[in-house]
Every structure is written in C-alpha cells, then in structure tokens.
Image (tube, grey):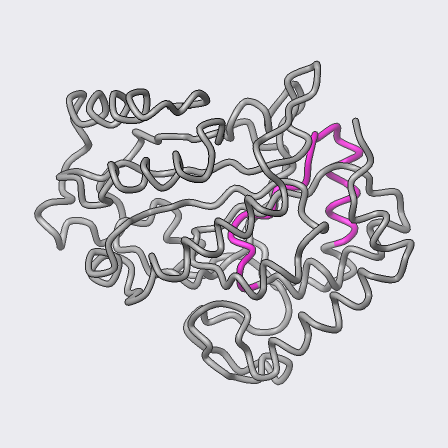
Amino acid sequence: MKRPSYIRLFNEGILQERLEKINRLINPCILCPHHCRVNRKLEKTGNCHAGHLPVLASWGPHFGEEPPLVGHHGSGAIFFSHCNLHCIFCQNFDISQLASGRICSFEELADIMIELQLRGCHNINFVTPTHMAHAILKALPRAIENGLRIPLVYNSGGYDSADTIRILDGIFDIYMPDLKYFDNETAFKLSGIRNYVDEAVPAIREMYRQTGDLVIDDEGIAERGLIVRHLILPENLGNTVDVIDFVRDLSVNTYFNLMDQYWPAYHAHNDPRLGRRITGKELEKALHHAESVGLTRIAD
C-alpha cells in the first residue's frame, strides 16, 4: 500500500503548522459552519455540545462499512460522541445526541489508532470527526512516531466547513461524507440546519479536489479518494434525485453508496412522513436514476 501523505507532512513540519491553524479555529470555535464562537479550550460548548477533549463512544474493527474499507480485517472505526447535526431520525442518537461515551486524552486517542492498526485494520475511520478535527491532528504526531502508516478516513455527516477541510488537505486519505439532503428547508426541519446544502456542497467539492475518485488496490482495499453516502428517506425527503445529479457532476466515477437502511429511529415518529421504512419502489427509482445519469460505481 502507498505510504499516506500525512507521514510526509509530519516529516516536513507541515503537520505542526496545520495543527496550529486548526487550534486557532476552536478559540473561538469556527471549526464547522455553525460558527458558535465559544472557547472550547475552556470547555465551553456550542451547538455540538462538545468540549476540547474527545469523548469516545467506542472503537474497534468495523465490518459494516463499504467493502473497500472493510477488506479482510475491518475498518478501524473510532466513534466520537456528539454531533453538529440534530437529525430527528438519527440511528446513533445515543452517541450523537445523548453523548454516551467517555472522555479520553489526546495521547490515548493516538494509542487507540496504533491498537487498531496492530489488530489488522486497513484504515483508521474517524466517525463524526467534524467537531473533533483538532483532536485528531493533536493525536496524530504521537501515532506517527509510534508507527502509524495506514490511511485515515474522515467519515462525516456532511455539514463541514470548506475552510476547515482545506486545512486537512493531505492529512486524510479518504473522505466519506453523507449528503443527506439537497434542500435547505428540509434540512432545517429534520436536522436543525438552515444552510446544510450551502455548506455541504462546497465542502464535498473540496474533499473531491484533494483526493479525487476512490483508488482501490489489487486486493480491493481503498487507498485514497472520495466516497459519498446518501440515506434514502421516505417520500423523497432528501431530494435524492438532486443528490445524485450533484454526485454525477463531481465525477461519474464517484464511489456512491445509496443506502436503503432507513428505519424510524429517535424522534422520527414526530414526523408522519418518517414513520416507515422506504419501499422497494423508492429504492428502485433512486438506483435507476443513478444508472441513467451514468454513475459507474453505485453501492447499495
């Protein structure tokens, strides 16, 4: 496997420069598009309710991700608690909204990365990293010094700041954002975000600019590139056709996962449109459109 570029950035001192830049974004915090402007170094909290230190819900080899991430030994998933989205249908609400988990130090976060690599994981998969980008960069030098050499995955809900993503250029090998909606009004009703599309679109474009189409080695393991996910919602609430068209405009070779596993979790019962799973017809319509516009790497 090709050596990740974050090792070069570390050796050249660039990683330290990026850490200094990202640290300036958390005092006051403008890491994500909420721009809450709280001082997280003083453990003040904003929209995501997260402080300075990471809170981890769990970590370990994960076999429920896309096949190029899972490979033979699993994706090394590190689940951060808290989230800058407040989706009423969140299937991980105990982690994202109720913040189950425990506080860990930056040093422990680095050691967990090494542990997952030693267990044979093909990558380090940071789940919901948007509000913890500073923690990842803080932990990374220790992990590199202790031998970290596998790809890093930025697995987010899509509500990211393009300015922050630009600072991460060369650090993350694989970006895996959700693109939940292509309609701001729906995003506000279901996730409490007024400008989701306005922020997610340029952030994902920047992710693609950095990494391009997903590169997979001879053993089927992802090395670098973009994976876009979209959870199909009942009644076309996510504007799935528009999401597909955007992904097509990025590249017809985008690795695109049309996810059909929606179920009414958390507060979904408060919206009558969300009280059921999607139908086979809804899935078929989405897949047909993705194929009709020429997307060549569709997962479902």
- Where residue 234 sits in the image (x, y, percent)? 17, 38
| Figure check: 1 above or below 17 | above
Q: Quadrant of residue 33?
A: bottom left
Q: Residue furthest left?
A: 272
Tell me if residue 286 is in the magenta stretch: no
Q: Give the total of numbered labels.
A: 0
Measured from the top left, where is residue 164 in percent x and y?
58, 64
Residue drawn at point x = 70 percent, y = 72 percent: 21
Residue 235 at what x, y percent from top left?
A: 13, 39
Boundaries of the magenta span: 110-131
The residue under the point 46% across, 71% down is 49
Q: Judge by depth and name the residue closer to the eye, 40 or 33.
A: 33
171 relative position to 154: left or right: right
Above or below for 45 versus 269: below
- Which part of the image, by quadrant, shows the C terminus? top left
Q: Residue at x 89, y 47 (%)?
A: 146
Residue 106: quadrant of the picture: bottom right
Q: Is residue 190 left or right of residue 79?
A: left
